Amino acid sequence: MEDWLRIGEVARRTGLTHRTLRHYDEIGLLQPSGRTDVDYRLYSRADLDRLFAVQQLKALGLSLTEIAAALDEGVDAAELLGRHAEVVEARIAQERELLATLRRLQAAADAGWDEVLGAIELTERLRHPEAWVRFRATLTDAPSAPVDVLIELLSDPVDGVREGATWAVAQRGDVRQELVEKMLHGDKRTRHSLAHTLGKLRDPDGVATLAVLLADPDEAVAAKAAFALGQVGGTPAAEALAAGLGDERSLVRDESGSALARIPEGLPLLIMALGNPSPAVREEAADALGLAAAVEGVPALVAALDDEVEAVRFAALVALGQVDDERAGRAIGEAVDSPDVRTRLVARRLVADAQAR
C-alpha cells in the first residue's frame, strides 16, 4: 500500500481541495485506480501524473471537457489549442473594448454621474441597430462623440453612416494616429475608409500612410488613396502620386494623374513624366496635363506629338486642345494635315471647337 496515495495526501501535494478531487472522479476526468476495503480513494503514481497534466492544461484556460478530450480521445493538440486561442483572442478584444470604455467614461466622471450616463447614452446611439439613429448621432454630437466609436463607424455597412462618421472625425483634433493604428491593417473596406478619411482631414502627416495605401493590393483602396493625396496636396503628396503613374492598374494611374493635375506641385512632375521610359506613364501624364490645362505644359505636349507610341501622341494632341494657348493652337493646326487618319480627324475637330468658342 505504500505506492498508493490517499485523497488527503494528493490534496496536500497538488493544492486541490477534496471536493475538487471528488468532482474530477464523478465526471470521469481523474478516477483513482484503487480503493480501500472501506471504499477510500487510492491514487497511483500514474493517477498523480494525470492530475498534473490536468492542472497544466487547465492553466492554459482549457475547460474540463476539453482537457478530458485531449487526454482520453486523442484530439489533435494543434487544432484544440488553435480553437482555444481564438476564444482567448475574442475575450481579450472584449476586455480591451471594456477598458477603452472605462477610460473614456473616466474623463466624463470628473464632472459627475450625469455626464457618465450621458456618455453611455451617446455611445448607445452611435451603435444603435437603426442606421438613421447612428447617422443622426454622428452629425449632432460630433464634438463629444468618442473617437474610438466614430472610428468603428468609418467601416459601417451603410454609406450614409460612414460619411457622417467621416465628417464627425474631421471636426476633431489630432485623430490621425489613432485612425492609422486601428484601420491600416483592417479589411479592404476599412482601409478604403481610412484613405477616404485621411483625405478629408487634409493632414500632411497622413501622406506617409496614404503612400502605403497607394500600393494596396485592392485597386479601389489604392485609387481612393490617390484621390486623397490630391486632397492633401503638397510636395510629398505629389511625389507619391508621381510614383502612382507607374502603377500597373489603370484606375490607380488615372486617379494619380487626375490628382496631380489638381495640385500646383503636380505640374512639373507631370511634365517630367512625359519623358518616362514607360509608354503608359507618358500617356497618363499627357492626359493629366490636359486636365490641368496649364500653359506651362504646352512645350512638353508639343514634343510628345512626335512620341514613338501612337497612344501617347494621341493623348498629347487631345491635351493640347484643352489649353488656351497660341502654341497649342499652332501645333493642332499642323496636325490637321497629318498622314494619320485618326490624328487628322481629331485635330480638325479641335480646330472647329476652338473656332466655335
Image (tube, rainbow, N blue to C red):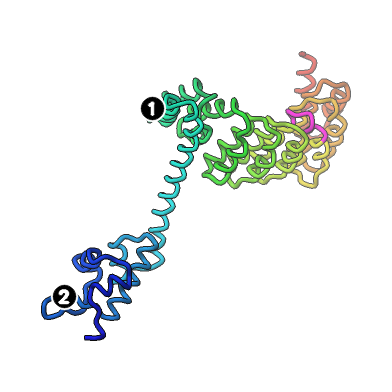
The residue type indicated by label 1 comes to: Glu
* Magenta region includes residue 82: no
The residue type indicated by label 2 comes to: Tyr
| Helix, strand or loop status at disc 1 | loop
Which sits in the foreground, 34 or 178? 34
Which numbered marker is on residue 309? none
Q: Provide the residue designation for mark 1.
A: 130
Q: Is residue 252 above or below residue 25?
A: above
Q: x, y percentage for residue 80?
A: 37, 63
Q: Provide the residue designation for mark 2.
A: 40
Dot placed on the residue nearer the N-terminal end, 2 or 1: 2
Number of numbered tags placed on the structure image: 2
- Of the 4 image quadrants, the one containing the N terminus is bottom left
- Tell me the CA gap for discs 2 and 1: 63 Å
| Helix, strand or loop status at disc 2 | loop
What crowding class fits label 1: few (fewer than 14 Cα within 10 Å), some (14-19), or many (20 or more)? few
Q: Main secondary structure of the magenta part?
A: helix
Farthest left residue? 38
Q: x, y percentage for residue 29?
A: 25, 68
- Of the 4 image quadrants, the one containing the C terminus is top right
